[in-house]
Each structure stands twice: as structure tokens, then as C-alpha cells.
């Protein structure tokens, strides 16, 4: 017997590739520490998730909605520090090299 | 199911955010965050700490309750606090004061003002009402006697009997009628 | 002394009497003359027997008048009258005999001619016995009174019935020109005063002379009322497609008013006079027309509403009638009762209840624009709908024009407008009007708003609608395979106007996911031709979807991974997570002797793929190979292939591939039927499923405890408003009250003076 696939309509969700190798599958997912909205949601300033409301990675490995972090860095009380660990904020380059990027 | 809540729950706040425009600086985004904090707080059931908005019309003013932790000198006492959120919360810390007179090295016995680093220069946008309440609860048992708002209290800290006497002299039990 | 005085007194009186009778004439000449006059007058007045021809003699009227004159001068007229009335009483049996005879004939035949004959006969008696006018008014009225007293004491109860029938017949007579033979011709002088000849005229004047118009006044009007009622029932029942009130009023003008002239305005000399005489009674009859029509329409109201909008004229009639007669509360009672009996029962479809409710809204708005009636009628319907689990779904389905149910709820002519909230009264509004007097204390000024707003306002929050809408939209979007969702986009655009842009933001994201999926797919396909076309969705913005956790085996896994790699190349900071239970796969199963095409859900595809590795599998082996799948789902998937003749259930949870078709499924016995296995399990969890969970988590204790801890004592309504902070909270204050009561019984809270607080621990 042979199974020929003629066409296939599938449903998938997109996820930010945070490097946290799919620890959660169905859960709420991680939230941005500043606005408390999940990464795949959008920050309070945005209406559309995804490319319009991207994430930002710090060298310290903490991740936030970009808009939330930039706003925090913009305040004087932030002292340009990561709100999580209070180390000076340095934006990390995104690593694109994932061998097994989808399960 | 909770994901639905996150995206849908604050329907009325999202209306406001629509009014306030796309800048996201308006009250809408703050109420959204405050609603989410309230949810978390209500769900988490941390013993001895609690807070709730004072009225349904204004999400920026909350009333809080802190019970002294067991095995501390404040054990068995309940303190009411007021929490006032700034319009740029969480980028700035909320203003918190004790409503119940609190005899404590880092609390102004008259005005209820609190000296706590995370409420001042150590504030971070990732802190929340829950973090604050927990910090305050532990502050009760572990005062910072180095920079006291109430030097008397700081000086008595090492003599628990006298300290307790002063504490109880100022303490007023929480009165239901007055607080609502 | 006393005796003497008495004698003198008697003497004086006698002298007076004598002088009066003798009229100061010589000797007793006067007395003799008096005696003659008395005899003549009493003879003349004697009530004669109509049946006795001899009694009918000629009189010298001059002599009679002189005699009366004489008696009058002797002041003996009262005595004459007394004598006459006494004579009458003796003769009354003659009338009684006639009455009995004619009534007997009527009772035997029910023929009103006998009643008419009786009337005329009575009139004959009356005329035969009437005293001449010279005797003065007093005698005439005494006579009339005595005569009428007698006949009314003689007429049997059945006379009323006959009289009513006779009056009823006059409606027809009033319209004809020629009288039936049993009515005597109208005297010429009377006739000339009428614009058109009226054959019923003599009948009416007979009634009047016999005093029947006064005596039977209410009976006459009741005949007219009944006549009106019969006419309305006959012409208007179930006739809702045209206005009836105006034709009825014309009918009144043309048929009833002319008739009314006889009983109510006979004495009028001019048209003007007649009009003023008829005014009062005419208004009473017009009122009765309105009342009768209003009663009829009230009885029919439920069906009129079903028939709307064809029945609109009937409702306009009703509106006009209700302004004239106060039958509003009857209308409310009747409609509420009909709704209870015919609408609000378990057998009725929610869809139908909503449709009828919408019709009720439209109809009652027409009848009563301020909305008091609607408020009173709608209340039980709204309460009932609130209890039905699928109400929101039905409303939402009709909002987006569900194909099968049609979009009857939304009137195309009604402009799409934002939802309107119940408004607080604005007294500065120049068009403000006080509430109608029959508005109850709980009547909320419900400014006329569109139907959708009214339906949505059944619930306290529109969030539920938006959520249901999201579920419905998700179901539709996920079923789309051709990438065409224009219809959904259009619907959302319309709904944005109603619910506000912000509320539908989530739907907006869902639609954008559809567009993005298409765009991404175009890119991926341009890089590498793929048979997989996914819909890529943003989690948190779609309703919870069935998340299975199985892994597609073999080539399917390869296809998924290939696609995901291409996706990741295109969107480096994102990755894909497949929802394995959802979607459809079009397959061709190539077997030794046949090819079976099938459209199947992923699990079916996964299983058949495994059979390409080996011919026989047990259910447990299959499940173990794909991962976490529950048994019923696995068996269902296998059954699909068994039904298609591809697998065979060997028993003992064992399935075998049929490389060669068995009997009944042989390739030669017919073309393989293309199978389309429709996803029966809804991919999207319904709002109810979600809600049930929510209630458990949020609503209970947590929020209430939180607020009572921090705010002290609170009244119930305050707790209710504060609970708006609890997401998805949608209970009524009554439900909250019951919950608090239960909590009180458990000792969690206490209540005093309507204030709730936590029990002291």
C-alpha cells in the first residue's frame, strides 16, 4: 500500500523562538515581565502581535516586548538597567542558528 | 482558557485604550496591567497579604492588607495600607502608606509613609503589587535600622518587650466600618 | 260646644260642595246639569273594547267638551280621573288577553312579526282609551302611566327577547326603502320631514308612544353594541393585512348613524339638532367599535406578531384603538400569557424564540413607541432567554448571517449602528417626555434602539457576545481551505460598527492571521513546492483550540518539518507549533487492486500511514506509535478506514490492511466512493465549556474574599459592581445573592443590615 498525500490543510501556531526549547507546550507561555502580557500577545501599545510587536533579548538573557523595554529604559529610574537583574542593559544579537527549529 | 482571558478580559479597558489612541501611554494600558495583577493576586492566595481596588470606578487606588508574619513581633496584627498607582505605572513605583498606625523603624508613625528601597530608587517595572506586599510583610520582621524614619522604634528594636509595648500602644485594630 | 262647632263645620263644607256642584245656579239646576255632564263624560271616557264593534260609537264632541267644562267648573275633574282610572283597571283584562294571545303566537314561532303586531295592537288600545286633550295634561299623564304600568306588568319575560330581535331587524329596515307588509305605511306628514323614506319610522314612533324607548333604552343600545360586535367579528377576524378601523367608522357613518336617528334623534327638526342629539350616544358607540376591535386584536396578538410585517395594518389599528380605550394592561396580560404558553417552553427552538421576540419588539414599538408595553412583555422573555445556554450563539449566528437560519433578525433596512446602552434620563433634553403613566417603577426609559442592541442587552455585558463571536469566527476561519474569507471580513466590519472596534480587536488579529498565513504560504511555496498549506494562528487571540499531542508519522512528519524549516528561514525569530488534531488531509490510498481517495482528519492519516509499514496493528500499538491519543478517538479514526473498506477489524483490538478488497468492497463492484470525513468534534471549545471552568476559578471566593478583606463590609450591589474586575463574570445580582447566602450558611461570611463581611477567623 502507498499513501499519497494530495494536499493538506493544517493548523499551526507561531511562537517566538526564545531559545527556551519548547518547555511549555500548551501552557500560558512566558509573559513579558513589564506588561505581564504573554510574549505572543502584544504589549499594551500594540494591537497586532508578532512582527508588529517584537521581542528584545538582553545579553543577560532576559526577554521583553521591545516596546515595553524601550519605555522602561527611557525612564530615569531605570538607570539603563535590565528590570530583572539590574545589570546594565545590553541588547543581544538574535541567534538564528537552530538545528531543530520545529517539532 | 486563561489565554482567552488575557486577550479578552479587559474589554472595557480596551475600549479606553482605543480612546487614548495608539500611543499606549494612556490609562488603558495601565488598567490592563492592573487588571492582570489583580487577577494574579486573587488567584495566588499568598497568606497574609491581599489587596483590592477601592472602587470599581478607579483602578488606580487600592486598599491592601498585610498580616504580620508568624514568629515575628508583628504576628497576629493586621495592617491596612493604601496603594496609589501613578499613571505611568509600572514604569514608576506606586505610592504606598500605612493606614493603620504602624510602629516600625522604616514607617512614619504619623503619615504612614514607608521607607523601602524597592519603592524608591530600586523600583523596577517588573515589580508588582504582590512583590510589594511580600516585601512589606518581610520588612515588618526585618527592619532596616540603618536609615530609620522612626528613630525611636529603631532604638527599641533590640528590646522586644518595650518595642512590643510601643507597638501595641500605637496599634489600632482594623475596624470594618471605617475602612469600607 | 265642641259638637256644635263640628256641626257648623260640616254644614259649611256641605254648603261649599253644593255651591260648587250647583255653580251658583237656581235651585238645583246646576246640580242636575252637573249630573248630566258627569254621565256624558264618564261614558265618553269609558275604556271600550276594541273587539266590540258596538262600543265604537260617534260622539258629539261639542257636547263632550261642554260636559268637561261643567265638571271642570265644579272642580270635579280629579274625581272624573279617578273614576276613569278605575274603569280602566276593570277593562285591562282586554289588553291582557291580546298580549297573551300575541305573545303565545310569538313564542310558538319566534316570528318577530307577532311582536310588531303586538306593538301596534297596544298602540291601538292606547289610542282608543286616551282621554281628550281638553281634560288637561294631568289626566293624560296619569292615563299614560297607568296604561304603561299595566302593559309592562303584563308583558312576559320573552317579550325582551322578541323586542331585541325586532330592534335588530330595524338595522336592515333602516337601509331599505320598502317596508315589509307587517309594517303600516308611514303617515305622509311624518314621512315628508325625512330626506329619505324610512320604513321603520312607524315602528319607532309606536315605541315612543308606548314609552318603550325609555323603558328599554339599555336594551336598545345593547342590541346596537351586539350588532357592532357581530359586524366587527365577521369583517375583521384574522384580517390583518389592511386597516379596518377606518372602514368600520365609515360603516358606522353609513349604517349605524342613520339607524341611530330613530331611537336617539327622532325629535330633531334640523340636521344640526340631530347631530348634537347624537353626539353623546355616537361617541359611546365609537368607543365600542374601538373596544371591540381592540379586544379582537388583543386576542389575536400572538398570531398577529407571527404574521408581522404583513400584519402591520392590524397593529396600526390597535395603536389607534388603544389611544381611545384603555386596554393596555389587557394586551400585556394576554400577550404574556400567550408567550408563556406558546413560546417559552422547552419544545421551542431558541432561534424561534428570538425571532418571535424580535417580532414582538418591532410590533410593540409600533403600537406603543415609548416602549412601556414592550418592557412589560419582554421581561419574562428576556429572563427565559438568559437561562437558555444557546441564546448568545443564536443571536451571534444571526448577526453574522448564518446560512441556514437566514438573517431574519437583522432588518436590511435598519441602519447598522453602534450598540446603545440603556440611557439615564436627561432632563435637559428638550424632547424629554415624562414616562407614560402605566410605566412601572422599574421601567427603564428604553429609548427606541435597534433590535440588535435590545438583544445584546439581554445580558449585562457584551463581552459574552464578543467571545461567542470569536468562537464562531474561529470555527469558520479554520474550515476555510481556499483562502477566501471575504465574507468573514465583511461580517467583522459590520460588527465593528455595532460592538466597537476595540471589542473586536481579537477578531481583527484572527483575520490578519489568515492574510499572513496566505502571504507566508505564497513565499514558502515559491521556495519549495509543498502540498501542505497551513493556517498559522496567533495563540492568545484565538479561542482555545483542541490541542492534541500526537506526532504525525512517516512522510507526514517529513512534510511538517520541511514546511517548518522553510517558515523559519522566512521568519527567523519564529517557529511553528502544529496543532495535530486540526485540519484536513486529502489522500489517495493506493492498494493492490484499487485506489481509495479520502478527505480525512490528521489522526486518520497518521494511522493509515502506519499501516503502510506493516499490515496488522493493535489499537494500543497504533496509539503508542503516535503519542497521546485517547482510545475513543483512535477507534473512531480506525472505523473510518474500516467503513472505507481499507482496514478490517479482526477483533481483539486488531486491525488488518486489506490490500485486496474483500466482498462488498471489491474494486470491480463499483467505483471507489470518494470519502469525505467531516470533522464532527468541534475544533473550538464552546464558550460554555470555557465558562464553566471560569466560574469555578474566578468567580468564587477569590475575588469576593479579596474585596471583603480589604474593603471591610460591603452591600451586595457593591460586591456585584466590584466583581466586574473578575474576568468573564456575568452573574446577575440575584445569583450573587444566592451565592453569598450559601457562603453565609457555610460560615464564611456574615451579613447584617445588608452589609456582607468575612467571618472572623
Image: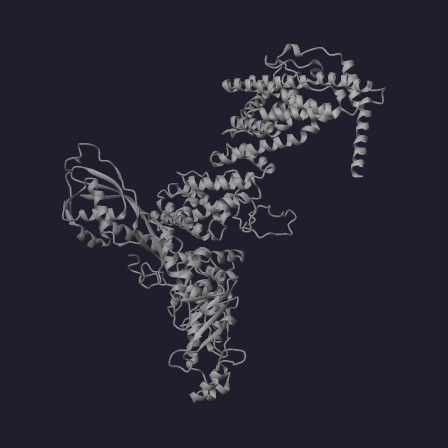
Q: Tell me what residue is drawn at x 41 percent, y 79 percent.
A: B75
Instruction: Give the left or right position of residue C102, taking residue C343 as reference.
Output: right
Quadrant that contains the N terminus of chain C: top right
Residue A86 visible, this orientation:
no
Q: Position of residue C124 (x, y in %)?
A: 64, 16
Number of marks present in the image shown: 0
Q: Tell me: residue C567, above or below residue C335.
A: below
Residue nearer the viewer, C154 or C349: C154
Q: Tell me: residue C227, above or below residue A101.
A: above
Residue C189 visible, this orientation:
yes
Residue nearer the viewer, A81 or B67: B67
Q: Position of residue B87 (x, y in %)?
A: 53, 66
Colouring: one colour
Quadrant that contains the C terminus of chain C: bottom left
Instruction: Give the left or right position of residue C543, taking residue B20 as reference.
Output: left
Residue nearer the viewer, C206 or C448: C206
Q: Position of residue C245 (x, y in %)?
A: 58, 30
Q: Tell me: residue B106, above or below residue C163.
A: below
Q: Position of residue C502 (x, y in %)?
A: 49, 53
Q: Quadrant of residue C727?
A: bottom left
Amino acid at each position: 500500500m502507498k499513501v499519497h498525500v494530495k494536499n493538506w490543510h493544517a493548523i499551526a501556531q507561531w511562537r517566538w523562538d526564545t531559545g527556551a526549547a519548547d518547555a511549555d507546550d500548551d501552557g500560558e507561555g512566558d509573559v513579558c515581565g513589564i506588561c505581564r502580557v504573554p510574549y505572543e500577545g502584544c504589549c499594551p501599545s500594540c494591537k497586532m502581535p508578532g512582527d508588529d510587536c517584537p521581542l528584545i533579548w538582553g545579553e543577560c538573557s532576559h526577554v521583553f516586548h521591545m516596546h515595553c523595554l524601550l519605555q522602561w529604559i527611557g525612564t530615569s529610574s531605570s538607570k539603563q538597567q535590565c528590570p530583572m537583574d539590574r545589570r546594565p542593559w545590553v541588547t543581544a544579537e538574535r541567534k538564528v542558528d537552530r538545528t531543530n527549529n520545529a517539532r | 482558557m486563561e489565554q482567552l482571558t488575557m486577550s479578552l478580559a479587559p474589554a472595557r479597558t480596551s475600549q479606553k485604550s482605543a480612546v487614548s489612541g495608539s500611543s499606549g501611554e494612556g490609562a488603558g494600558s495601565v488598567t490592563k496591567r492592573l487588571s492582570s495583577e489583580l487577577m494574579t493576586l486573587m488567584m495566588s492566595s499568598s497568606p497574609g497579604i491581599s489587596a483590592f481596588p477601592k472602587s470599581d470606578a478607579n483602578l488606580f487606588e487600592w486598599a491592601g492588607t498585610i498580616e504580620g508574619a508568624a514568629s515575628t513581633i508583628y504576628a497576629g496584627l493586621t495592617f491596612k495600607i493604601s496603594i496609589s498607582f501613578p499613571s505611568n505605572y509600572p514604569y514608576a513605583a506606586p505610592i504606598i502608606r500605612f493606614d493603620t498606625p504602624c510602629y516600625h523603624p522604616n514607617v512614619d508613625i504619623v503619615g504612614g509613609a514607608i521607607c523601602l528601597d524597592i519603592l524608591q530608587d530600586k523600583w523596577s517595572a517588573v515589580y508588582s503589587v504582590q512583590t510589594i506586599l511580600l516585601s512589606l510583610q518581610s520588612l515588618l520582621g526585618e527592619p532596616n535600622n540603618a536609615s530609620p524614619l522612626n528613630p525611636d522604634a529603631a532604638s527599641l528594636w533590640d528590646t522586644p518587650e518595650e518595642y512590643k509595648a510601643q507597638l501595641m500602644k500605637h496599634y489600632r485594630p482594623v475596624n470594618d466600618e471605617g475602612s469600607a | 260646644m265642641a259638637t256644635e262647632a263640628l256641626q257648623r263645620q260640616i254644614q259649611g263644607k256641605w254648603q261649599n260642595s253644593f255651591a260648587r256642584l250647583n255653580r251658583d245656579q237656581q235651585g238645583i239646576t246646576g246640580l242636575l246639569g252637573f249630573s248630566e255632564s258627569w254621565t256624558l263624560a264618564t261614558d265618553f271616557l269609558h275604556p271600550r273594547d276594541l273587539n266590540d264593534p258596538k262600543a265604537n260609537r260617534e260622539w258629539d264632541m261639542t257636547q263632550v267638551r261642554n260636559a268637561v267644562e261643567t265638571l271642570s267648573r265644579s272642580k270635579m275633574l280629579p274625581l272624573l280621573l279617578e273614576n276613569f282610572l278605575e274603569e280602566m283597571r276593570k277593562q285591562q283584562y282586554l289588553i291582557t288577553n291580546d298580549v297573551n294571545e300575541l305573545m303565545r303566537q310569538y313564542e310558538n314561532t319566534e316570528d318577530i312579526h307577532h311582536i310588531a303586531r303586538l306593538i301596534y295592537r297596544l298602540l291601538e288600545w292606547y289610542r282608543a282609551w286616551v282621554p281628550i286633550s281638553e281634560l288637561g295634561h294631568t289626566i293624560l299623564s296619569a292615563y299614560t302611566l297607568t296604561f304603561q304600568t299595566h302593559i309592562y306588568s303584563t308583558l312576559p319575560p320573552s317579550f325582551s327577547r322578541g323586542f331585541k330581535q325586532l330592534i335588530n331587524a330595524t338595522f336592515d329596515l333602516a337601509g331599505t326603502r320598502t317596508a315589509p307588509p307587517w309594517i303600516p305605511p308611514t303617515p305622509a306628514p311624518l314621512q315628508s320631514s325625512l330626506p329619505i323614506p324610512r320604513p321603520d319610522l312607524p315602528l319607532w314612533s309606536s315605541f315612543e308612544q308606548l314609552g318603550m324607548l325609555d323603558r328599554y333604552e339599555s336594551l336598545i343600545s345593547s342590541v346596537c353594541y351586539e350588532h357592532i360586535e357581530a359586524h366587527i367579528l365577521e369583517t375583521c377576524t384574522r384580517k390583518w393585512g389592511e386597516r379596518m378601523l377606518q372602514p368600520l367608522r365609515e360603516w358606522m357613518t353609513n349604517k349605524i348613524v342613520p339607524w341611530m336617528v330613530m331611537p336617539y334623534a327622532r325629535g330633531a327638526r334640523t340636521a344640526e339638532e340631530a347631530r348634537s342629539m347624537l353626539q353623546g350616544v355616537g361617541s359611546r358607540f365609537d368607543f365600542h367599535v374601538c373596544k371591540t376591535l381592540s379586544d379582537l386584536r388583543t386576542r389575536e396578538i400572538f398570531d398577529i406578531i407571527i404574521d408581522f410585517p404583513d400584519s402591520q395594518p392590524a397593529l396600526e389599528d390597535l395603536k389607534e384603538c388603544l389611544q381611545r380605550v384603555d386596554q393596555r394592561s389587557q394586551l400585556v396580560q394576554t400577550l404574556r400569557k400567550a408567550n408563556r404558553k406558546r413560546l417559552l417552553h422547552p419544545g421551542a427552538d431558541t432561534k424561534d424564540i428570538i425571532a418571535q421576540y424580535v417580532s414582538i419588539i418591532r410590533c410593540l414599538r409600533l403600537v406603543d413607541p415609548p416602549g412601556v408595553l414592550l418592557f412589560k412583555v419582554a421581561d419574562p422573555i428576556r429572563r427565559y432567554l438568559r437561562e437558555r445556554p444557546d441564546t448568545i450563539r443564536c443571536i451571534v449566528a444571526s448577526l453574522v448571517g448564518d446560512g441556514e437560519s437566514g438573517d431574519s433578525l437583522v432588518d436590511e433596512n435598519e441602519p447598522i449602528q453602534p450598540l446603545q446602552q440603556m440611557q439615564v434620563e436627561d432632563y435637559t433634553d428638550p424632547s424629554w417626555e415624562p414616562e407614560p403613566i402605566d410605566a412601572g417603577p422599574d421601567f427603564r426609559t428604553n429609548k427606541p434602539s435597534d433590535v440588535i442592541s435590545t438583544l445584546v442587552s439581554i445580558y449585562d455585558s457584551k463581552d459574552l457576545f464578543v467571545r461567542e463571536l470569536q468562537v464562531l469566527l474561529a470555527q469558520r476561519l479554520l474550515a476555510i481551505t481556499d483562502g477566501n474569507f471575504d465574507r468573514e471580513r465583511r461580517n467583522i466590519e459590520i460588527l465593528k460598527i455595532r460592538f466597537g472596534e476595540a471589542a473586536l480587536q481579537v477578531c481583527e488579529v484572527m483575520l490578519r492571521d489568515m492574510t499572513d498565513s496566505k502571504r507566508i504560504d505564497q513565499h514558502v511555496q515559491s521556495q519549495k513546492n509543498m502540498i501542505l498549506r497551513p493556517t498559522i494562528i496567533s495563540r492568545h487571540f484565538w479561542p482555545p483550540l483542541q490541542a492534541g499531542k500526537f506526532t504525525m508519522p512517516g512522510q507526514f512528519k517529513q512534510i511538517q518539518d520541511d514546511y517548518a524549516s522553510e517558515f523559519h528561514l522566512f521568519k527567523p525569530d519564529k517557529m511553528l507549533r502544529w496543532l495535530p488534531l486540526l485540519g484536513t488531509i486529502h489522500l489517495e490510498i493506493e492498494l493492490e487492486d484499487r485506489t481509495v481517495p479520502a478527505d480525512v482528519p490528521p489522526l486518520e492519516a497518521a494511522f493509515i500511514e502506519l499501516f503502510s509499514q506493516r499490515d496488522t496493528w493493535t489499537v494500543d500499538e497504533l496509539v503508542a506509535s503516535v503519542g497521546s491519543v485517547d482510545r475513543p478517538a483512535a477507534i473512531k479514526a480506525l472505523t473510518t478506514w474500516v467503513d472505507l473498506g481499507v482496514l478490517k477489524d479482526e477483533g481483539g483490538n486488531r486491525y488488518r490492511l486489506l490490500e485486496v478488497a474483500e466482498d462488498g468492497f471489491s474494486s470491480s463492484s463499483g467505483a471507489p466512493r470518494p470519502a469525505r470525513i467531516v470533522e464532527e468534534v468541534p475544533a473550538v471549545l464552546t464558550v460554555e465549556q470555557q465558562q464553566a471552568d471560569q466560574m469555578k476559578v474566578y468567580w468564587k471566593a477569590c475575588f469576593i474574599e479579596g474585596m471583603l478583606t480589604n474593603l471591610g463590609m460591603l452591600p451586595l450591589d457593591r460586591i456585584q459592581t466590584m466583581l466586574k474586575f473578575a474576568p468573564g463574570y456575568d452573574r446577575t445580582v440575584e445569583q450573587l445573592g444566592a451565592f453569598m447566602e450559601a457562603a453565609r450558611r457555610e460560615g464564611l461570611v456574615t451579613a447584617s443590615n445588608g452589609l456582607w463581611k468575612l467571618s472572623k477567623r
